[in-house]
Amino acid sequence: SLISLTSVAFLLRGNCKHVRTKDSPPNICGFNLILVPDIKICRLVNVKTVIPMVQLLNWRRGLFPQTKMAAPLTLVLILSVTIRAVLFRSSLAELISERVEVVSPLNAWKRGLFCYYVLQENNISLFFQTPLVIYLFHFVVDYAEIVFMIVDGITAVALYLAVQNYNKNVFRKQKYALEADRYPHDCLELMRSPKEMHYIPLKVAMFYLLNPFTILSCVAKSTCGLNNAVMALFILSTLKGSALLSAIFLALATYQSIYPLTLFAPGLLFLLQRLYIPVNPCRSRFWFFTVQYSVMFIGSLLVIVCLSFFLLGSWDFIPSVYGFILSVPDLTPNIGLFWYFFAEMFEHFRFFFICVFQINVFFYTIPLSVKLKEHPVFLIFMQIAIISIFKSYPTVGDIALYMAFLPVWSHLYRFLRNIFLVSCVLLACTALFPVLWHLWIYAGSANSNFYYAITLLFNVGQILLVSDYFYAYLRREHHLSQGLYLRRKDGSEATLVLK
Amino acid sequence: MATRHLFIELQTLNRRAKLKIIFAKFQCLCIIPALVGVDKKTCIQFCLCTFQEEMVIRPLYSGDIYASFQFRTQWDTDFLHDGKKVSHYRLFPKSLGQVLSKFSVRELHISFTQGYWRTMQWGQPFIPSPPGAELWVWFHHTVTDVDGNWKELTNVLSGIFCASLNFIDSTNTVEPSASFKPLGLGNATDHRFLRYATLPREIVCTENLTPWKKLLPCGSKAGLAVLMKSEKLFHSSFHSQAVHIRPVCKDWQCTSTAWELRQTLNVVFDLYTSGQGKKEWSLFKMFSRTLTEACPLASSSKIYVDVTDNPGGELFDLSPSSPLISTAVVLGDRRTYSVYDLTKKETFGQLRSLNLLLRWKGENDMLRPPLHAERYVSGFGLQKGEIHTCLYNSHPYRAYPVLLLDSLPWYLRLYVHTLTVTSKTRENKPSYIHYQPSKDRLRPHLLEMLVQLPPHSVTEVTVQFERALLKWTEYTPDPNHGFYIGSSVISALVPSIVAMDTNSTRDRPLFSSFFPTKEESSYFMRVYTEPLLVNLPTPDFSMPYNVICLTCTVVAVGYGSFYNLLTRTFQVDEPSAPLAKRLANIIRRLRGVPLL
């Protein structure tokens, strides 16, 4: 045991260069290490796992990378704005703004402009968009391009800050767990190091800003960008722990397109967790906070709805926006599952299937919240992904929002089963959408089934992607509690199965 | 004398029409009141009907012949008067009268048209109508449920005229705010009581003509109506039949109202190409019949032949010639007509039949109509498109405003903010725009605007639209043929050509020609554009089961994978023991020996 201890000390001395930071001289870091682990563990620890462990234990609250990240973020912002500006000025802008993949009847700029025009000229309230957005048109109609670029920037920065905050929390928790020796000892390679986490917020911002889906959505001036910004602000305010702001942004997002209602559960779970309130129905504190959060949410929702009413003087927008979302009267093709299904539906089954499909979106909230109650941020990711797959008028802008989170889960990469296949499917579908659309609508050499087939495949790809991440997340959690290298009773290497 | 007259009729007429006519005549002579003891006042009420029939023949410059029939029945009674139930009908068709009183209709205009009136080649028609069926109705202002009345009325009319008017529903009915004003008495301006609908796809044929002819007092047994043989009428370039009912003044002081029923039939024969290039026509050639008498119930029965361009007989020969000449300002132009009065015996000559014959000798230029319009869809593909409406003002120096009415079905998603109006490459902002947005599966778009047409110009109105994908049951049986979009309606007060002619040397007193007189300076004109044929994207109609299965499979893939991950837990895969070992263990357990 002495030999192993010395070898660890030796190793430490050799590797302290890696972990040295301004405030932590190598000696202290070595001291910490020797204090914490017991000799027995040290014997098991192999060379590979020592280094991250040392790094982990050295990380303290104040030591989280505070290096200058603003510069790269600014660069990404400038780059993305340049790309968008160039595209806005090119002849592609008009083409993009008419692509059915990029705009849906609910978020097309043209329709919004039309509603705005009709409202102004004829004083007739006609909605494809919520009244507040139409009212917003009043101010932004002349500077739409700049506004949409700024909105995208806000989303990216909000996501950046949110993820930075989240990573800090993750790291702190990991540290406490390590210090409390809660992880099995062969799991050290699952631990996350500050180095790999350092660039994650930047990657998230990049994934959002430079994602072709976001760029297309922005160039098409789809109001989906606004919805994404509201959602990102909701995530940010939740992760920062501001219950009121979180409720307000959630209410705004819900007001925009009903479906974000399902984010209520993860928002609540996160805030509870942050306040160290256990999710326990017997505790009055739990109920107190839940009621408090619900009242804030419902209150702000009511305020927003009443505000729309006072702006327009009629309740017409409720059936024409929410009825439109829920009853799917417009069957314009998009990348979702609804349009062709309801174009081909038998009339007497229509209502039944509309109910089934709409319930499907909200259905997963409760089981997912139960399963992931310890991991509300992953729950948010899952919910956003489910919404963007199963909502009635999805566009690529919705997909871009949940795809921005993928870098956050980069540590799950080793557990993903079919990421290669899924990325190939998604890429191929993205390329095939315009091709098959052209063949159907312009060339007339294909029919609607071609486009429909590609939407099916695209959605299967998305479902596999999301469920794969879900699987990987659960599996990692399992390993964190049970150990990485599991063995059977007879000592042979075990394979994990879902039972 | 009267009995003798009746006797002759008995001999010549078919039995059914005979009885009707005799009955009507007796009523008028007040024999029936005497017989059944009705007082004289009621009798007078019976008798206050007049029936007039006339036909106008206009040779067109393209070599075609335009024949326009009008039958006018006037009845001095008021259906809509409170507490008065009208149950005695004489010349006025009972089927229509009952409909009018039941649905409180103030004015009714219905037309069925086959073919498109080519304004540029044919000039203006006397009564314009769009291709297909058109129906517009003003309801009485006491009606509370206008939509309900309208729905029932269209269904009843559909039965009366054997037409598919029952396809008129809220998706193709509009309430124009300015284009359709009442043509009869009363200045109703509240367009809540107006309903307008067109069915551009309606095909007009014999089954619509027969019920239309039955509304005439003489049927098709006597008078001008004998010429209406469907095999000839429908072998033509243009055929349009219409019924117009409106309240009119009974006398010039307008002390009380009377009802006027006008049945019109317009037909254009292409005798030039079918007649081996000879510009020659006669009644017999057109209708395969000649005229032998007027309708005995008609107070006037006349044929007018337009001879304006032929004052000296250098252009064509008309035989038999008529000594009667009438001059009138028709559609802004001063026209001269030869008149044949069918109620006079000498019109029929010695053969006791009238067969008008006209032979062309020369060519002539046509005066271009001051206003005409055309419409088309531009763009390619099935995603979007643009509707162009071109309005031509051919007046050399007068600008005038026109009202443009467009009623477009909801499945064309019209973007009104893309509306542009340009004339002479400059923007021409409409001074009035009324837009009623559509509602999916409920209401069509209604776009009305007032556009000032500069003199001698083309004004182009464009608006962009997107084509919707419909439910598979909403397509017509031949979906790839396309969807017909009704004509747009252009209504205008057009400056007349007569008023242009200020340097006239005609025999008019000088004091009458300095200021243009009101009634001659401009006239009302309505022009219909072509209906549009628009293709929509179609789903695959053979796929419903497949689509339901495939989409549900994808949803099930999502559900299944989430369900799996949510309900199951990770466990180490322990291989199950082989069968022999398990059996051995069971036996060992029974024996009470430790297991293997």
Image (cartoon, rainbow, N blue to C red):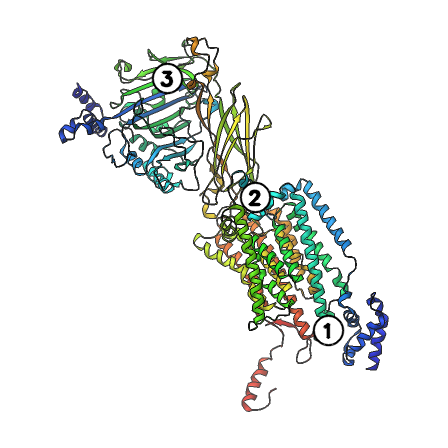
Numbered disc in front, either 2 or 3: 2
Residue denoted by label 2: A111
Front-most of B405 and A103?
B405
* Quadrant assignment, res B176: top left
Tags 2 and 1 touching, CB below 8 Å? no
Residue A387 image point, x, y percent: 58, 57
- Image quadrant occupied by the N terminus of chain A: bottom right
Spatial CA distance of label 2 from label 3 is 56 Å
Q: Which mark is residue A178?
A: 1
| Circle 1 residues within 10 Å: few <14, some 14–19, many ≥20 | many
Kind of residue indicated by mark 1: Leu
Residue denoted by label 3: B305
Q: Considering only order in the chain, which callout, 1 or 2, is on the residue closer to the N terminus?
A: 2
Tags 2 and 3 touching, CB below 8 Å? no
Q: Left or right: where does residue A68 sit relative to residue A290?
A: right
Please say if A180 is above or below A411.
below
